[in-house]
Amino acid sequence: MYLEHFGLKEMPFALTPNTEFLYEQAGHREALNVLLVALRGGEGFIKIVGEVGTGKTLLCRTLLNALGDEFCTAYIPNPLLTPLGLLFALAEELGLNPPHDTHSHHLIKQISGRLMALHSAGKKVILLLDEAQALPAETLEAVRLLTNLETETSKLLQVVLFGQPELDELLAQPSLRQLKQRLSFSYRLQPLDRARLEGYVSYRLAVAGRERPDLFTTGALDALCKGSRGIPRLVTILGHKSLMVAFGRGDAKVQRAHVRLAVSDTEDAHHGRKWGQGGGRSVSRRWRKVLAGLVWRRSGSRES
């Protein structure tokens, strides 16, 4: 709705994890390099941890795109599974189609055979588990046992765990100490500081077709940094809403006031004293006016 107004070709702040918008200076490039080095070296277990909204899923998808033909990947985005359920999910990712009544012992034999065949073909097999903090402890132990499958010289299966900080608490359980000892590499994604946030916003605008980098004023970027706490997902949400406000008012640039209104309408954003929860009705009224302005401007542009 605001693309033409701001000289954009596509939405710069869409929430869908699009790897074209990966901002490599936000710690993700370093994390990706850690992953690539570890996986090419044949390491067994790797862990990537970050708060909600720091870009773990985007990093995971970027990794999938970056791995060459020598890798075979099994990606499980929702690992809230029993040990048997995980075995079935892995088998399906590896191209197997076992009957639903297959016993776990026979299932492991099928998986082992498939891993050996891929190894003989020169493939390294990577299991990527997103949202790994949701894995039951017994399922994590089953994952560890799978990494026991090996030849005399190399592992048949490598595992990358992507999870929120609760994953560290899960791995601290005494029952999982053997798995924790096998973690060869780990990386923690950090929120954006003020400088990186400005680069993140400018990069996304450039990818979306904006030729000039000054769409957000300095005050707007300051408010965006404070309101988002540097969490990329919140930066994305607030950036989109701020553009909506500026467009609805017919402004050429995003100002601090536009971002503050976006922050006021976003539940997980940092509101501060002035933009706190008191006066929720007035915030709601202001946001309804913004939406009404968007509808009017959009219908007016169609009529013209």
Image (tube, rainbow, N blue to C red):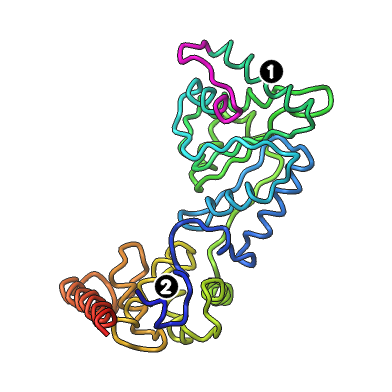
| Distance from Cα at disc 2 to Cα at disc 1 | 49 Å
Question: Amino acid type of disc 2?
Answer: Gly
- Mark 2, residue position: 239
From the viewer's perspective, is residue 105 above or below residue 295?
above
Q: Is residue 274 left or right of residue 187?
A: left
Task: Decide whether the magenta segment is chiefly helix, strand or loop.
Answer: loop
Magenta span includes 102: yes
- Mark 1, residue position: 113
| Crowd class of label 2 (few under 14; some 14 to 19; many from 20; radius 10 Å) | many
Q: Read off the magenta span.
A: 90-103
Q: Is residue 83 left or right of residue 301?
A: right
Circle 2 SS class: helix
Q: Is residue 303 left or right of residue 61?
A: left
Along the line of sight, the residue nearer the viewer: 101 or 47: 101
Residue drawn at 46 percent across, 11 percent down? 101
Circle 1 SS class: helix
* Residue 177 x/y as whole percent: 61, 30
Along the line of sight, the residue nearer the viewer: 254 or 198: 254
* Residue 236 x/y as whole percent: 44, 67
From the viewer's perspective, is residue 256 above or below residue 97?
below
* Residue 284 x/y as whole percent: 19, 72
Question: Amino acid type of disc 1?
Answer: Gly
Residue drawn at 69 percent across, 23 percent down? 148
